[in-house]
Amino acid sequence: MHNSTKIKLFRILLRISYWPSLLLVYPFARLKKKSTASIFFFFDRYSLGGAQRIHLDILKAMPEIPKDVFFTRLSPNRAFREEFYHSPATSCRDIHFWCDNLFFRLFTVHYLCFYLNRHRRCTVLGANSTFFYDMLPFLRKDTRRIELLHNFTFGKKGMEFFGLASYHSLDFRIIYDEFTRENLRKQYEEYGIEKRWEDRILFIEPGVDIPKEKIRQFEDPLKIVCAGRGGAQKRIHLINRIAEECLNRSLPVEFHFAGTLLEELSPEVKSYSVIHGEVRDPGKMGEILSFCDIALLTSAYEGFPMFIKEAMAHGCIPVATALPGNRMHLASNENSLLIEAVADENSVVIEGLEYIKALLRDRALCQKLSHEAYRYAAAHFTRDIFNMKYRELLLSR
């Protein structure tokens, strides 16, 4: 069943359950103590991921402002839990138990809407949370509703369909790559949505820490890093194949893996790679990127990933699939090497391997790409603009 149909059916159930909820859960929502916060965040989870790192950065942009965070999906790991729960002036609650069960979810939506509606002129921001979209029709009129859309999933039944079903209820939709903006415009046109709604789409580029540039020697073995989570989108099995080819050909390279992707690696690759596991400390991740020479990415689809931004900020050369989000910042043979055959997995492996061999042959090319990657990151990815824009958006009424 397509997401659009499921969304409509569930919203019918929500309308049906409103009156029983008014009787059964409204009294409990009235008894709950009002929050001192005026900003409420609904995030998916606190597990390892680039999206979660952006969510943390949003909280850190306003360290002095009281804010409440609700996690609405089960987190497969606790990588960022402590960092979320210890963010300045932030109260966190994991409510996934009440969201996962269909029956409980119906009443939890109304309970939290009853509770939030006691806070006049508050702001609610949701990211990667379908629960957030379920609440939108039931929030009071003076509540400001903001969506952060991380990427457009191209028919994968992703968040863009929840945003489409709620576009008229959203004050702003935040995106951070131009390809997602263009796809939203096309989606609006396809579904007959007036162009005036495009004015509510905001562009806010995530930032990263920019250390002092390191002068690299690019000595053998070249160190190749892949970090983050696994899953079908990331196609870690292609990186595994590239690593196996490097091993079989005795190329002077060393692979480094960090994150929750280890189960997708073969025993052979694990045995000759450096395994860092889940890296929760940004400083530790920075050390790994500063130590490594090449950042390898074989994703089938996504926006512009935080992993590549952070790699560039440390002078690590991106070797990545030529996704539209990547093309927004990466130019092959200028600040990166782009794998053009995105859809053909065999060609991704072949191109990725050829780029690694090219870097092994030409250390001057390594120096050039590393410097240009760093220079571009320093010019475009600082946190200052990110912090300023989120503060302006969330604190001004």
Image (spheres, rainbow, N blue to C red):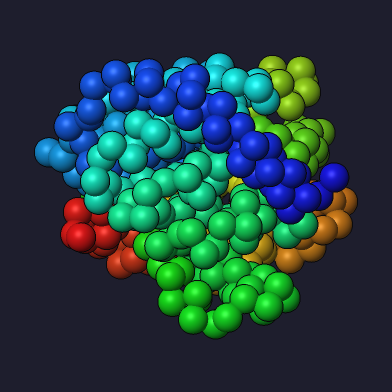
Q: Residue furthest bottom?
A: 195
Tell me the residue at 61%/46% (across/down): 296
Quarter of the image that includes the C terminus: bottom left
Viewer-side residue, 250 vs 74: 74
Indicate whether 386 appears above or below 290.
below
| Position in image of residue 56 (x %, y %) | 34, 37
Tell me the residue at 77%/36% (across/down): 237
Query: Going by the image, does 119 lie left or right of 248?
Result: left
Residue 274 visible somewhere in the drawing:
no
Indicate whether 13 appears above or below 393.
above
Q: Residue furthest left?
A: 64
Q: Quadrant of residue 11?
A: top right
| Position in image of residue 55 (x %, y %) | 39, 41
Q: Quadrant of residue 351?
A: bottom right
Viewer-side residue, 161 vs 49: 161
| Position in image of residue 309 (x %, y %) | 44, 53
Indicate whether 163 appears above or below 125.
below
Tell me the residue at 73%/66% (across/down): 340
Q: Quadrant of residue 337?
A: bottom right
| Position in image of residue 248 (x %, y %) | 81, 33
Tell me the residue at 67%/71% (across/down): 187
Indicate whether 215 appears above or below 86.
below
Viewer-side residue, 96 vs 346: 96
Quarter of the image that includes the N terminus: top right
